[in-house]
Amino acid sequence: MVAGWRRWGGLVYQIGRFLGGRGLEAGPSPVVAAGLMADFPLETTTYVPEARAWVHNNSGELVALDAVCPHLGCLVRQKEPSRAGFYCPCHGSEFGPNGELERGPAQRPLRQLAIQTRSDDTILIRT
């Protein structure tokens, strides 16, 4: 009987640790100022650590992708320059340059993030 209570206590403790104070927050996602438009040269892909996002400048149009792999939450990296796209160093998932899923074990593509340019050329990313 005591062992059963210990198991439940351990489970409740782990759930509490997982949720923490931040897991219970509600409201809109934070917005990250990623830099100025000049920080994202044409035809380049730049990692923005504050947003955990990859930003690609495709002929002056910026696209932001969540760098968190949808499989188990590792941060994806850019593939070698000769191969466009991203890969997960933890479990081997691969994604195309637009975040599309190319190979699992991930089941979903990388999430595209909302991005906007303010009048002063500051780039904002909604994470």
Image (cartoon, rainbow, N blue to C red):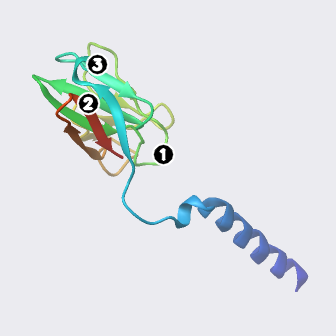
Nearest the eye: 42 or 33: 33
Task: Determine whether label 3 and label 2 are within 8 Å by CB.
Answer: no
Which residue is disc 3 drawn over? 39
Q: Secondary structure at mark 2?
A: strand
Of discs 1 and 3, which sits in the foreground? 3
Counting from the top left corner in percent of width and height, residue 115 is at 23, 41
Q: Residue at x 38, y 31 (%)?
A: 87
Counting from the top left corner in percent of width and height, residue 48 is at 38, 29
Which residue is disc 2 drawn over? 122
Kindly identify the amino acid type of the residue bearing the numbered disc 2. Thr
Q: Is residue 61 left or right of residue 29?
A: left
**Where 84 sits versus 51, above or below?**
above
Counting from the top left corner in percent of width and height, residue 51 is at 40, 38
The mark that comes first in sequence, 2 or 1, is: 1
Quadrant location of the N terminus in the rendered image: bottom right
3D distance between C-alphas at marks 3 and 2: 10 Å
Q: Is residue 25 left or right of residue 36?
A: right
Of discs 2 and 1, which sits in the foreground? 2
